[in-house]
């Protein structure tokens, strides 16, 4: 993996960064691992209807890697000759979102958090459904490693990114002015609009195995820096 830093815009004057806030999915761990973990949970929980859990799990993984990524459960039921039963799909989704995931911080994220601890205030701002994101945060042990964690869903669906509310709350809770905050995330389509509006520094981690790395940034949503590995994060904080 290359570790080149692409700087897309430059601050007019040097700023001291005192808080580093991270997105969760595909920034601190591989979101694909969460999906695969969820499929295993669903296959086990619905074995009575879906049959052999391992066969079912493998097929869901294949569907996730195909054009059916956004409708894995629907496609699975269709292929199994089961009609698309809305109630069954709702229960499968509930199991998926509430399962206890088997996921781990990426090696580079783990190392970066250890390096930054004590030198910067650390936080997480994550979109996504509250139950699912809470379970991920628990599984990753992030309460012990972060000063503040905000799941935007706690504030209300209308405050998901790109709303600025979570970023304003984070800055206040950490006691760090917006210009001294940095946000590290993977998805240019939605992650950098709000922090840029508030004057935060923005850093994209380019996860080529990630789900959203190739999204286009809307006007005003391009990151200040793009890095391909969190090993280079401090180069963007000086
Ligand atoms: Mg993400």
Image: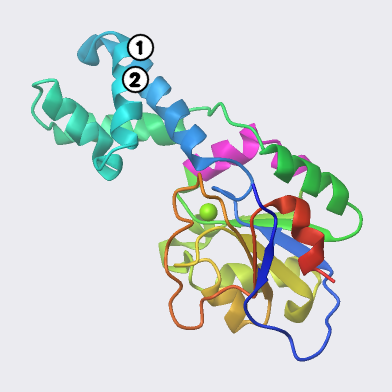
Q: Are marks 1 and 2 in contact (CB under 8 Å)?
A: yes
Instruction: Give the vertical position of 39 relative to 197 (above or below).
Output: above
Q: CA distance from mark 1 to mark 2?
A: 6 Å
Quadrant of residue 82 within the rendered picture:
top left
Instruction: Give the vertical position of 182 relative to 179 (above or below).
Output: above
Instruction: Give the vertical position of 145 relative to 203 (above or below).
Output: above
Res 39 label: none
Q: Residue furthest right?
A: 118
Query: Foreground residue, 198 or 7?
Result: 7
Report the predominant secondary structure element of the magenta stretch.
helix
Q: Indicate the secondary structure of the residue bearing disc 1.
A: helix
Range shown magenta: 132-145
Asked whether mark 2 and ligand 1 are closer than 8 Å, the reply comes as no
- Using a 10 Å C-alpha cutoff, classify the residue at mark 2 as few (fewer than 14 neighbours), some (14 to 19) or many (20 or more): some
- Residue occupying the point 50% across, 66% down: 188
What residue does disc 1 label? 54
What residue does disc 2 label? 58
């Amino acid at each position: 993996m290359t570790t080149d830093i692409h700087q897309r815009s430059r601050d007019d004057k040097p700023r001291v960064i005192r808080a580093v806030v991270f997105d969760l999915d595909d920034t601190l761990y591989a979101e694909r691992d969460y999906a695969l973990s969820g499929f295993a949970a669903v296959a086990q929980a619905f074995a009575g209807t879906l049959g052999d859990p391992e066969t079912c799990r493998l097929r869901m993984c294949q569907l996730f890697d195909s054009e059916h990524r956004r409708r894995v459960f629907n496609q699975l039921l269709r292929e199994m000759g089961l009609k698309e039963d809305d109630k069954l799909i709702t229960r499968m989704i509930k199991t998926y979102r509430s399962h206890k995931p088997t996921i781990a911080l990426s090696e580079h994220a783990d190392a970066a958090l250890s390096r930054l601890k004590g030198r910067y205030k650390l936080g997480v701002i994550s979109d996504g459904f509250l139950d699912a994101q809470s379970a991920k945060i628990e599984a990753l042990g992030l309460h012990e490693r972060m000063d503040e964690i905000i799941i935007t869903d706690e504030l209300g669906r209308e405050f998901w990114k790109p709303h600025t509310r979570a970023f304003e709350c984070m800055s206040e809770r950490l006691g760090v002015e917006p210009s001294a905050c940095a946000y590290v995330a993977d998805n240019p389509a939605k992650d950098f609009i709000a922090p840029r509006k508030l004057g935060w520094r923005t850093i994209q981690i380019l996860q080529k195995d990630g789900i959203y790395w190739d999204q286009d940034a809307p006007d005003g949503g391009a990151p200040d820096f793009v890095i391909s590995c969190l090993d280079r994060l401090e180069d963007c904080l000086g």
